[in-house]
Amino acid sequence: MEYRIIKSPSRGTLDILFRRKGSPSSVTIEDYDAVGLVQGRLIDMVFAADIAEKGAGVVVEDIKGHCPQNLIMIAIFGDTASVEAAIKEIQYKLKEAKTGEIG
Amino acid sequence: MEYRIIKSPSRGTLDILFRRKGSPSSVTIEDYDAVGLVQGRLIDMVFAADIAEKGAGVVVEDIKGHCPQNLIMIAIFGDTASVEAAIKEIQYKLKEAKTGEIG
Amino acid sequence: MEYRIIKSPSRGTLDILFRRKGSPSSVTIEDYDAVGLVQGRLIDMVFAADIAEKGAGVVVEDIKGHCPQNLIMIAIFGDTASVEAAIKEIQYKLKEAKTGEIG
Amino acid sequence: MEYRIIKSPSRGTLDILFRRKGSPSSVTIEDYDAVGLVQGRLIDMVFAADIAEKGAGVVVEDIKGHCPQNLIMIAIFGDTASVEAAIKEIQYKLKEAKTGEIG
Amino acid sequence: MEYRIIKSPSRGTLDILFRRKGSPSSVTIEDYDAVGLVQGRLIDMVFAADIAEKGAGVVVEDIKGHCPQNLIMIAIFGDTASVEAAIKEIQYKLKEAKTGEIG
Amino acid sequence: MEYRIIKSPSRGTLDILFRRKGSPSSVTIEDYDAVGLVQGRLIDMVFAADIAEKGAGVVVEDIKGHCPQNLIMIAIFGDTASVEAAIKEIQYKLKEAKTGEIG
């Protein structure tokens, strides 16, 4: 799983994310100071989205790439401090609770 | 095959799963305490879905990722105990009956 | 190539297969005792479908996964004995006639 | 590149190929004794289709798999002798003229 | 990056290319003596298309494969000499100007 | 991450990029001296698009390939000097701030 934080994202960058987000286009994603990008496997991203959502002051969107094998990317929008806190929380919770293996 | 159990999934997390589920959008997936995610190969996931469905108190959905090679993910919705029981049953049954190899 | 046989498949399992089958949705796949799943490369699956179809008492469907590289899956519906016979016939015929290599 | 020849293909096998062929559905592919399947990279398959088409008594179709990386499959329909001759011709011509490498 | 040159392409071969080309279907690709196929990564193919287009007497089309990872294929239509000249020019220019690496 | 700069791109080259760009087709991409292509992972490309957008005199578009695994490509349009400056800036900023790893 990898992440990046973009501060004061440009208009064009938000457009790229906006065109790829999973939620209906009526939901806008424009009024935020920072965006955190987290890329990983589908199963982990659903888990990470849940952790971020339960934090304060952020909005989570899943972003469609082009046919990543079993990877998706989520974007976490909010002020810089909240986005950084969400990324930290994901790092902490994922270390604590590893994905289980069957078979 | 890998799994994760999310307790009290957030609204945004259920939205991500809802937008990716295979069944018609008239079916809602909102009223559950927990969700179990199991990710694996198509052939094993159909088998796992069958095991989970035959257990009590859970609903099974297949979740579309972005073009995972031959992987899909199923989500098992229900109260925490039922979801954990379904995951345990899948682990047990899959150990018992390995996928057969031809040629 | 890999296979699994599911006896008395559950409603939800048949729904997952039904939503992914290649034939028109007017064709129903509900009235069978067992389903055999065979997963492999496109070229081998067309060959396997032909072997199964020439056996008695089974119906063959190709099932769409999510973007398996050059893998597809076929499902063989019928009573348990017929499905097991079809899987055995595929095993035997594919051992006899290997896929040819060019260049 | 790999190939298989199916003699007297069953109705269901032809249906699978028919649903996946690239040409308009007005073109039918039903009246042939045999079908040769050749699977390989896009660049080689266009070349192979051209070789087969220039032979006598066969019809060539490209068959869509599920997202094979850069693989496609062509099907060569005709009587058994013509299909076998087309496969032989492809083997011979591809040995003679290897795909060129740039850079 | 790989290439092949097909002289006097057959009707069926042109049909396969025609169904997969990126430009609108009003543009026909039928009146050429030869077709050069070049397959490679998206970034190199855009570069190669530009080199070929700046040569004389050829038309360039991008051809859709089935989900090649980051590969696409371009087809260069023209008389045999022009197509061969275009392929040579691509070989020369790509040796001269390698793709740059970042990070 | 890889890049190429094409000076005075040909009509056909711009058409290939135009047909693959993510923004609405009302936006034209024709009036530029040069185009810089940068290909990489989705998470890095969003980051790179943001860096380029914050530079002067360039327009950034994301370009759809065919199902690159988790790769996308961005195109940076502008005069040659601005495009080269944008590529340099991306090289510099990405060396400075590596993608973070979780777990």
Image (cartoon, coloured by chain):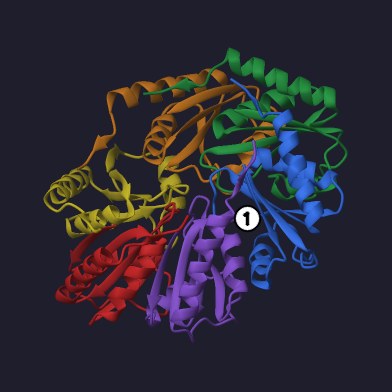
Chain colours: A red, B purple, C blue, D green, E orange, F yellow
Of A45 and B48, nearer the camera is B48
Q: Chain of mark 1?
A: C
**Residue B62 sits in which quadrant?**
bottom right
Give the residue number, with chain letter if any, for mark 1.
C64
- Image coordinates of residue F43 in percent, x first then y, are 29, 56
D25 to the left or right of D39: right
Query: Which residue is drawn at the image coordinates 53% and 56% (left, top)?
Result: B95
Q: Secondary structure at mark 1?
A: loop
**In the rendered image of this protein, does residue D58 appear above or below residue F86?**
above
**In the rendered image of this protein, does residue F101 appear above or below residue D70?**
below
B7 to the left or right of A77: right
- Image coordinates of residue E37 in percent, x first then y, are 52, 29
Would you call the spot at circle 1 few (<14 residues within 10 Å), some (14-19), or many (20 or more)? many
A19 to the left or right of D42: left
**Residue E12 sits in which quadrant?**
top right
- Image coordinates of residue E87 in percent, x first then y, are 45, 23
One can see residue F23 in this view: no
